Image (cartoon, grey):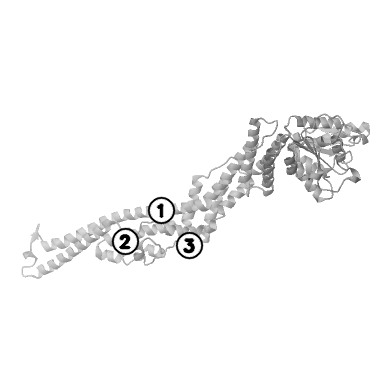
Amino acid sequence: MSGKLAGTSPTEATELGARLDGLAEATEAATGRLDDRLVGQAGGIVDRAGARMRLSADHTVVAIAGATGSGKSSTFNALTGLELSAVGVRRPTTSWATACVWGSEGAGELLEWLGIPDRHQTTRDSMLDTRREGNELDGVVLLDLPDHDSTEVSHHLEVDRLVVLSDLVIWVLDPQKYADAAIHDRYLEPLRSHDDVMLVVLNHIDEVPEERRESMLADLRRLLDDDGLHRVPVIPVSARLGWGVPELKAEIAARVADKKMTRARLEADISSAAAAMGEASGQGSPRSLPAARIDALDGAIADAAGVPTVVDAVRRATAMRGARDTGWPPISWLSGRQSDPLKRLDLDLGPVAKQLAGSSAASVPEVSSVQRSVVDAEARRLADEAGDGLGAPWQESVRRASVARLDELEGRLGAGLSGAELGAHRVPGWFGLVRVVQWLLLLGAVAGLVWTIVAAASSGGLGGAAHMAGVPLPVVVLVGCLVVGILLAVAARVLVTRTANARAAAADQSLRAVVSDVSRDLVVTPVEAELAAYTKVQEGLSKALAP
């Protein structure tokens, strides 16, 4: 803040500025989350307090408010020693307040901020007055407000506006209407947190029989205590006869002398707004999202997106391709006639997979209504656990954030999962090597079979053929190639299974990473934003309420 209030030490000014900054931070974070009226009132206090701190620090704004017939304007005239405000039937039907200023230097901007027209301003030090007066009210801007019970709506609005802008408010009551609920319910009780910056005057005390005055003052004291205004003094006055006017002027002078009324009013405003926001916000400790609950949400979304189905398809497709490439060719030819699981899912897994699957389109299993309801339920569970212990508005805010973007779920999953790198299109090099060896063994077996037939049909028969360990060599070639091919196929099957499992695990990790990104973007991040806003509000309110 650029201004510095008079009577305020640098430390006090810094503390007040920090409290105001805290309320501003809380107000900003609470916008759209707590009640709009409540947040709007706090924001208005931030703006008003900031503006007041930049204006004259040498003037104290004292407003005199009261109902019709209370003698408010008579009290104003008695304090100024001038007939500035019309009274009784002569009071103008205007919605403007009247101002009297003691010490005009530096008050111009303050009066402009208060919205007092020039024609309703009087500078006390400019009057040609020969009476000898003290200077106890130097620095006072005294306002005579319109009647708060006037039938004119503009009068109500002017009173409401200036009451919140004044540093000290004097409520003038009269013996007939001092218990009127209109002023107690509308003004006094709502300002119970501002008892340090208010005075109550019971005017027309001369019209009350002397024996009843003490009981009437006691009854008014009781009503004020019921309003929570225990520290507001009550001063009996007769503005017409001048009774109590010196005491009232002395009380105002004492309040103004130390130049702390403005700071006291700002502090009361800040505390009141912060307390109201704190009550609405709740006092629960800031929370973070449990990892287990996020994992449960990711699992529900993964199931809804068909991740287990895709992973199983990758496993079976890899195993099928491995069996076809590394198995005994006559048998692997039969396995090659089976439908590719990835083709049935219509997944885009790369150039090789496109050729094998016969499709270039990418898609994932559609999210059914049942699966969507499961995801919604998990998102709400996450929100309920995150909002546990927070105030009702924040629980609703967290709950709303958790499901606000779930309509985007299917589209985001389709785009994300289709672009995921599953690795199924990469055929291991050893598949091809084994395939070549298998075909060579098959050719060797065929050659051994032909050789065996030819040798058997010759004149010498198989006995005339070369032998190895007593077995005709053609038979050795035939049987050896068959046995080696079968054993190689069995060994390859074990390795193919391991490869399929590894590919499935990699695909699962890749797909769930996409799911986690979608989950974080659509649910987790919005919920965390609400929790961060709650933390910011609590921290701001803590600063605003700091002693």
Label number found at residue 510? 1
Distance Cα–Cα, label 1 vs label 2:
21 Å
Type of amino acid at the residue the image marks with label 3 = Glu
Type of amino acid at the residue the image marks with label 1 = Ser
Q: Residues within 10 Å of mark 1 (few under 14, many from 20)?
A: some
Label number found at residue 366? 3
Residues at marks 1 and 2 touching, judged by CB atoms closer than 8 Å: no
Which quadrant of the rendered structure holds the C terminus?
A: top right
Label number found at residue 321? 2
Looking at marks 1 and 2 on the same chain, the residue that comes earlier in the sequence is marked by: 2
Type of amino acid at the residue the image marks with label 2 = Arg
Where is residue 417 drawn, in percent x and y? 44, 58
Distance Cα–Cα, label 1 vs label 3:
19 Å
Looking at marks 1 and 3 on the same chain, the residue that comes earlier in the sequence is marked by: 3
Residues at marks 2 and 3 touching, judged by CB atoms closer than 8 Å: no
- Examine the image and state in which quarter residue 355 appears: bottom left
Where is residue 475 drawn, in percent x and y? 13, 63
